[in-house]
Amino acid sequence: MATTAGLLLFAGLLAENLRRGGSLQVVAAYGWAAFAALIGLVALGLALSIDFERGFFADHAAVALAHMILGGFGFMGMLALGFSHVLVPMFALSSAPAKRPAYVAFAATVVAIVLGTMGAAHDSTVILTIAGVIGVAAAAAHVWLMRIALATGMRKRLGLSFILVRASWACLLLAPVVGLAALYGWAGANGATLFGLMLLGGWLMTFLFGILQRIIPFLASMHVTQAKGAPPLLSELAAEGPLTVHAVCHGLALVGLAAAIILDNGMIVRGAAAIGLVGALAFAVFTGDVVRRLIARRT
């Protein structure tokens, strides 16, 4: 109930922001789809928690898979895809993707998520297969649009952050493929777990870290002015060392976890988790350093 209340409050704030941001039509479309997915996610999550005690779902695991698809691809996925239409062109100094192919990719994504959620809830292999195939096409369309934005941008050297972003796009393409393989038992005994890793750790988390590497110092620079009135350079507000450590550790941890899942090896999981912890601490040092420099300059 507490989680439900918090997420519904966030949903209200999201809806208010979307209502005021109608000029960004494609982004708003993704945002409203994410809002709808969030409402469904909250409802399913609450129902699943009650089902542990009441047992009114015929197949708890099937509904749990629907909940995961709605949360990973629906809520967080639609937000990541939608804001990419603003953030990627902004960092690359390029034009926003063309509206018609952007809306085609949006429509395909919505259809894939709706079918995937329905197929999972009803434990239908046929519907899940159709959803997976459409999902692969939608992911490919999104990556194609983003690559055009990078190719036509004025800024070519985007640094370490966009190595992570490109890696996240690869995982976005892999996630529905691994999901289809797991559905038919072609991904081994732990195929479902590998699918979850590609979705949550590979795509969403990697994309988030890549964007945060650039957006944290960028936002900090907006709150600082130098003696001449110009904002400081981003390099003056962020250290590169911790970001390099984080990126290397993050990549090694993901590869290690994928290998551990495929090989069903607990020792590799522990090693990958330790490497991931080092990466997480490095990112925390980066964030803390930006805050420290921001406070020092404002003071």
Image (cartoon, rainbow, N blue to C red):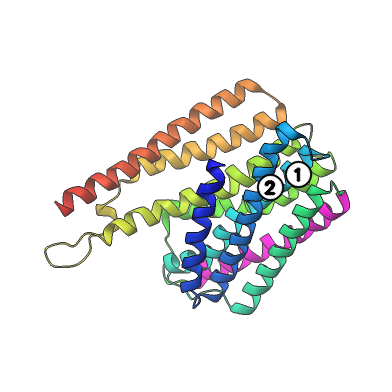
Q: Is residue 142 magenta?
A: yes
Q: Which mark is residue 44?
A: 2
Predominant secondary structure, magenta span? helix
Point out the tag, 1 or 2, that comes first from the N-terminus. 2
- Find numbered disc 2 in the image and state the secondary structure of the residue it sits on: helix
Quadrant for residue 106, please give it: bottom right
Which residue reaches farthest left?
227
- Tell me, yes or no, whether the two marked residues, 1 and 2, touch with CB atoms within 8 Å: yes
**For this rendering, which residue is in front, 102 or 56?**
56
Residue at (53%, 46%) from the top-left corner?
Answer: 205
Q: Does residue 217 appear to the left or right of 53 in the view shown? A: left
Task: Name above or below for residue 91 compared with residue 49.
Answer: below
Q: Does residue 76 appear to the left or right of 9 in the view shown? A: right
**For this rendering, which residue is in front, 62 or 103?**
62
Measured as percent of width and height from the top left, residue 139 is found at: 67, 60
Measured as percent of width and height from the top left, residue 170 is found at: 62, 52
Residue at (76%, 61%) from the top-left corner?
Answer: 134
Q: Residues within 10 Å of mark 1 (few under 14, many from 20)?
A: many
Q: Is residue 104 magenta?
A: no
Segment colored magenta: 125-152
Quadrant of the image for the N terminus? top right
Q: Does residue 299 appear to the left or right of 43 in the view shown? A: left
Q: Does residue 23 appear to the left or right of 215 in the view shown? A: right
Q: Report the Cα–Cα distance between label 1 and label 2.
A: 8 Å
Quadrant for residue 193, please give it: top right
Given the image, on which type of amino acid does mark 1 rest? Val
Quadrant for residue 55, please give it: top right
Q: Which mark is residue 63?
A: 1
